[in-house]
């Protein structure tokens, strides 16, 4: 009950907009080294080298979680790196099935439906069918499949 109702409007007089990390890849090396130095003190480790290939990989990643995700990736790398002076970084896999952020919504929807159909052995409707898993009516899923050009593969 102590929050001033007009505070948002007072702060919004001078808005500060920070673009997402994927739009400023040149900031990533400085952020990585900043996180590394902070974790060195916390973990009692010393990192002297981050390979150029690793830094390029970090710069090309889309960072849907922005700086917080980068920080978590670096912290994990500090924990699991076997080499005492070189940082080994492994990026998270998008959705566990390799879907990249640059796919269109149409293609993502198509891939998701195909994935669910594959898991249900192409059972579209009924108990345990793809429509039920996707939370759709069977006719709606069939319509989407037709729109997206999804056809059951011929039995071989």
Image (spheres, rainbow, N blue to C red):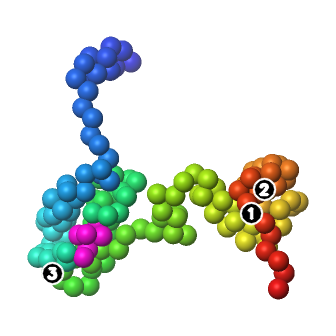
Q: CA distance from mark 3 to mark 1?
A: 50 Å
What residue span does the magenta drawing correspond to?
53-58
Q: Which residue is mark 2?
A: 146
Quadrant where the N terminus sits is top left
Image-based side of 117 in relation to 77, left or right: right
Q: Residue at x 73, y 71 (%)?
A: 119
Decide if residue 61 is in sight here. Answer: yes
Q: Residue at x 30, y 74 (%)?
A: 89
Q: Which residue is mark 1?
A: 150
The first of marks 3 and 1 along the sequence is 3
Quadrant where the C terminus sits is bottom right
Q: CA distance from mark 3 to mark 2?
A: 55 Å
Label 3 sits on a secondary structure element that is loop
The first of marks 3 and 2 along the sequence is 3
Image coords of residue 65 (percent x, y): 38, 53
Image-based side of 66 in relation to 119, left or right: left
Image coords of residue 15 (percent x, y): 26, 27
Q: Are marks 2 and 1 in contact (CB under 8 Å)?
A: yes
Magenta highlight on residue 56:
yes
Label 2 sits on a secondary structure element that is helix
Q: CA distance from mark 2 to mark 1?
A: 6 Å
Q: Which mark is residue 85?
A: 3
Q: Main secondary structure of the magenta part?
A: helix
Q: Residue furthest top?
A: 6
The answer to which image quadrant residue 109 occupies is bottom right
Q: Please say if 17 is above or below 24.
A: above
Label 1 sits on a secondary structure element that is loop
Image coords of residue 85 (percent x, y): 15, 81
Task: Judge the density around disc 2: few (<14), some (14-19), many (≥20) Cα neighbours within 10 Å.
Answer: few
């Amino acid at each position: 009950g102590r929050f001033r109702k007009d505070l948002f409007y007072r702060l919004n007089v001078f808005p500060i907009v920070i673009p997402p990390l994927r739009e400023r890849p040149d900031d990533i090396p400085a952020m990585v080294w900043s996180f590394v130095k902070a974790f060195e003190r916390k973990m009692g480790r010393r990192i002297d080298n981050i390979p150029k290939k690793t830094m390029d990989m970090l710069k090309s990643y889309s960072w849907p979680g922005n700086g917080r995700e980068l920080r978590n990736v670096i912290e994990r790398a500090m924990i699991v790196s076997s080499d005492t002076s070189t940082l080994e970084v492994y990026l998270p896999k998008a959705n566990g099935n390799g879907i990249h952020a640059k796919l269109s919504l149409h293609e993502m929807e198509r891939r998701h439906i195909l994935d669910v159909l594959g898991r249900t052995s192409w059972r579209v409707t009924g108990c345990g069918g793809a429509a039920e898993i996707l939370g759709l009516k069977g006719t709606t899923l069939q319509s989407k499949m037709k729109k997206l050009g999804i056809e059951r593969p011929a039995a071989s």
